[in-house]
Amino acid sequence: MSTLASLPPELIREVISYLPIASLLAFGMTSKEHHAIQCCSLSTLRLGVFPSRLAGVISLMEAAADISSIHSVQTVLPRTQTRTKDMIIRNQNAVVQKVVDKHRHTLRDLEIALWDLKKPSACSVSRLVNLRRLSIRLDHPHTRHAKVDRDFWDISPVSTVWNSFFARSDERKVFGRLQSLNLERAGITDFQLQQVLRDNPMISDLRLRKCLVLTRETFEHLARDETRKRLETLHFTWHGGDEIDDAILDYIEKLHNLKSLSLHGCRNINGDLVKKFNNDRWHIPDIGLPHDLENTEKVLEIDPQYK
């Protein structure tokens, strides 16, 4: 009678890669050999690290609806590691770094949710050379913590952390096979984003939510770069900067292959003009119009007794 051990290792990895995360981890605990196979089988992962269970539930509700990963892990930090904002962020990054390093050879689809990204964990993510899809979610506006001001979620300061995501001549190799990139509340600059796009010429899905440092220069680059020939999805949302106005619409017109565009929450863009441009010139099948922020803000009700 055939046993699991009699199957080729590559076939075992293929089979167990479809297991839910709890079953996959349980399989890895049965023997050293199975643990090695389990570590090589995790290709898709949604990892959230939060100070409370409630924060994790809210984050999952806010996550993009089109993400369907069977390997979804919500980690709750011990109360002793959540006394201050800096402590929470430091411990969140430690968890992310540990998990990513363990599976760096196999991960192809990664989403991480935490409050801020630090250089050690950013370097670990950048070493995922087989990565095809990356989502970094730093925007959790409905999270409440005694040591965190409400306006913390309204800013995305410039950071050198994002330098870890593109190659420089004398440094280690970074990922270069990305096809999809999603950043939320990232303090990435126009230059840093341009370098990431340069190193990942296959990106066709680009989503930038509340990346407040970016300016019109990003749209200028997209319009003249080779990226415009491949880009099928562009979501540039929740940006209230003065430079993100109707002038960017001329650059969008040069993105001939767009199938989905969203400018939701960009309050300095005329929604009627976007609609007119699309009807007369762009003909993009799926389009999200900018709206008045005051009229579209959602109210999320929660049970205060839930812990």
Image (spheres, rainbow, N blue to C red):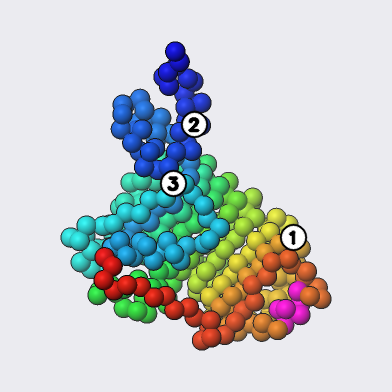
Find disc 1 in the rendering and name its residue: 257
For the view shown, which residue lies furthest in the left direction?
Answer: 80
Give the number of marks.
Answer: 3
**Viewed as shown, does residue 265 lie left or right of 227?**
left
Magenta segment: 273-278
For the view shown, which residue lies furthest in the top direction?
Answer: 1
Find disc 2 in the rendering and name its residue: 15
Find disc 3 in the rendering and name its residue: 71
| Residue in the image at 51% along x and 62% along y | 64
Residue 58 pos. (x, y %): 39, 66
Residue situated in front as seen by the camera: 23 or 293: 23
Q: CA distance from mark 3 to mark 1?
A: 32 Å
| Residue in the image at 65% along x and 61% along y | 233
Residue count near mark 1 (Cα–Cα under 10 Å), binned few <14, some 14–19, many ≥20: some
Q: Disc 3 residue type? A: His
Q: Disc 2 residue type? A: Val
Q: Quadrant of the C terminus?
A: bottom left
Relative to 98, does residue 10 appear above or below in the rendering? above
Q: Earlier in the sequence, mark 2 or mark 1?
A: 2
The secondary structure that most of the magenta stretch takes on is helix
